[in-house]
Image (cartoon, rainbow, N blue to C red):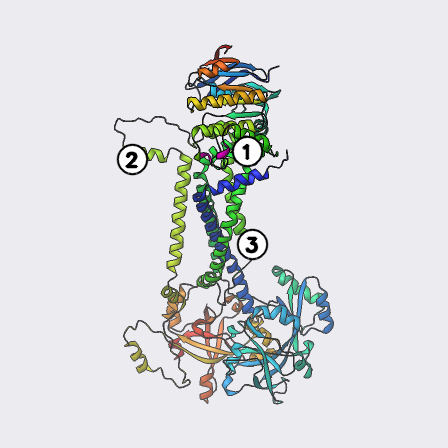
Amino acid sequence: MKNNNSTVIRRLTGRSLKFNKKRNFFIITAIALTTLLIGSVFSIGLSLVESVKMNQIRFAGTLAHAAVGHPTASQIEQLNKLDYVKVVGTGNNVGFVKNTPQMGKISLTLHYFDKTEWEKLRSPAFVDIVGNYPEKENEIMVSLAVLKQLGIDTPYIGMEIPLTYYTDSENKDALISESFRLSGWFTSYGFVQSMNTADVILVSQELSQKYGKTVENDGSAALMFDNESRIPEYCSALVSDLGLSENQPVVAVETYGTDNGHSTATLIALCAIAVFLIFTGYLLIYNILYISVSSDVRFYGLLKTLGTTPKQIKRIIVGQILRLCLIGIPIGMILALLFSLKFVPFLISELGAVSTEAVVSFSPFIYSGAVVFPLLTAILGALKPAKKAAGISPIEAQRYTGVEVKMENIRLSAHGKPYKMAFRNIFRDKKRAGVVLLSLFLGITTFLTITTLVFSMNIAKYIESTFESDFVLENSAWPAQKFDKAFIDKLESLPGFEALSLTTWERMSLDYSSDAFGKYIANHPMRDQIANLTEKDIYKNFNGFIAGVDANALIKLNKTLDKPIDIDAFERGEFALISTDNPDLFSNVHKLTVSPSYRSENDNTGSPKINIPLGGFVPFGYKGIGSGLAPTVFISNALMR
Amino acid sequence: MPILSAQGLKKYYGKEPNIVRALDGVDIAVESGEFVAVVGMSGSGKSTLLHMLGGLDKPTDGKVIVDGYELTKMSDEQLAIFRRRNVGFVFQNYNLVPILNVYENIVLPIELDGNTVDEIFINEIIDMLGLSEKRDNLPNMLSGGQQQRVAIARSLAAKPSILLADEPTGNLDTKTSQDVLGVLKMTSTKFHQTIVMITHNEQITQLADRVIHIEDGKIVREGRG
């Protein structure tokens, strides 16, 4: 039966709200709080997922899943037609920069990326991009880290940067000196892992063409597939689909081990918190509405007596709750948004899941979830009196008190004790008492959880867990040794001194064999730069660092390692450690043959080689020592001497 | 054919052994245009009978037929619509909607039905009941007599064929009681309404066409007023 009664329904809805201001206030607060809590938890969760993913992409330096070396023009065309390849970007080496003394040992190459490669694959992995990709022949784009290496701290667009380089690797003496103009810069994490030992300077297509560089001879095609989980399958499919030859390797981009299960655990914990909060929020809203059920049932009973149908009553109730949600949800949403912007980046770095800048997620999922859930809860909670009123006759509804008095076996003494009466009153309606107690319990638990979380974010604790020491002293006068016995004794006698651990390091070269280190080279952080190197080149340049640490410095580290290191044996110099996050890459390495280069430069006796078994792994970048082409090797200080 | 009839009407509350038999087998038939007074002691079941006749409460057993409709077979939805179209209620405790003003209370049944309010007729009733001054007041601003008059105005607004009144003058002083009764008598004649009224008032029973005496949920005596 359809009729025009919306005016009176609207009037009853509006009037009910007007006459229940106190109840409205609490319901709006409850809705806003629930929205805030759910919105925040979803925001943290999704931001975490996105940050971890972004972290991996930033470390990989590209969104690409794989690369094909030296593809021909027709192969690139074929790639574009393959249905499982979503994006094909190309790029090629243009030249090698000749280092000035201030640049140190960094190896810089001039590299060209085509438009697709830059826009779709590279730039999303870089942060704080300023300016544009080089277009003119003399323009370059450089990462901030490289600019620093070049001695530029405050770059500006159009600044002159002189570079000397050669374009033919066979003819390193054909040097070209040119002054480039800076067209842009960015922050890249892709090469951070290589600790400033190799990086690229981006140049224009014009320059690349000027020297006759082609993708086929000097470059590779970077590919993004349609399905992340089928990369290995696609990589092998490419070989037959393109008819790739021996010198056209397909290399999958490995996301570096930034996700060590930490973020998965955090996500599970967050899911648990979300479920918990959803339940708490539900109870909060439900409880407030439940308390007003009795008077509401009476009111709806009265309306029913006067000829209001159950459907109309439902419309009045839903209308009220929708109007309250219209106020409460936006308030909660704005609070959640502020929370996301202000605290989420901090929380994510606090959780230790990522090491690059956190990404705040604004996924519509967060906000639709934060709208739908409180809305549903509120409507469900509010419809309860309607159901109650609809289920019983109007007369019974008008007399409704919400309590079914079942007083059995109660012996009343002449001198009733007030506390007993109070107690009986609380449990008169067992269900309501249960709901109230449960909400109180959950409310207090939520409060305690949040308080604990907030107060556990103690900066001192954070520093202690993240940094190994308060001060790090470095010897800038190297190779002269300033940290002699007297100096260390002096340090130890300083007031407030607690502990000291020494790290010593030297350059070294490792004996290379493709059997042992092939896997490592294929997944090297700088694989883009070293893709052109022959086995012989690698053998000649398999250089890196060897570092000595105090055995007791490993005690703390040992707690976080899956395979603890035998500290005593390490101290005695029985084995060496390799610094990596992917121990699997070294499964074929059993013995290391190290030639410390410092000695070889000063000794005329040639390089004394040290043979030492490989006995374990420490995380990549341990003690802040990066790697060269070869992985960094750690031994005990005793052995180092 | 009676406009209002009940057969074997029973309403029990609770369970054995504490069962309360509010109505215990009542048969009643009211002709169109008749004015029936129901009298009985407090707790005799007369209010329950009235609720059953108006479709406000569901009987444990028996049936109620109003104007050819069997109320006991109707759904909540249908009952609500039936009530606002065919039955006017006047309750002892007025049952005004506290959040609506006098005028809004009076026209509520009409508006719930989605009909246009007959302004002339409503104003006539309001004037007749002396409520013109209080049109925009909320019920809690009115005295008991005024509230009862609002309830009567509401029961008449939809021009129902049946008027069910539960001690409409129970809370009123003699003077107001007489006014209210006069109005009821006048409107019932004017709109050819059937009235069933619960009362303790001797004067009212004398005005009625028929008086029904109830005791312990049973009709014990029926007679001319």
Label annotation for residue A365: 3
Q: Chain of mark 1?
A: B
Give the foreground label among 3 and 2: 2
Q: Residues within 10 Å of mark 2 (few under 14, many from 20)?
A: few
Q: Is residue B25 above or below residue B165?
A: above
| Residue A553 can be seen, yes or no | yes
Q: Main secondary structure of the magenta part?
A: loop
Looking at the rendered structure, the kind of residue marked 3 is: Phe
Looking at the rendered structure, the kind of residue marked 1 is: Leu
Disc 2 target residue = A419
* SS for dot 1: helix
On the image, the x and y values in percent for residue B158 come to: 58, 28
Quarter of image, res A176: bottom right
Residues at marks 2 and 1 touching, judged by CB atoms closer than 8 Å:
no
Residue in view at x 54 percent, y 14 percent: B28
- Magenta span includes B131: yes
Label annotation for residue B108: 1
* SS for dot 2: helix
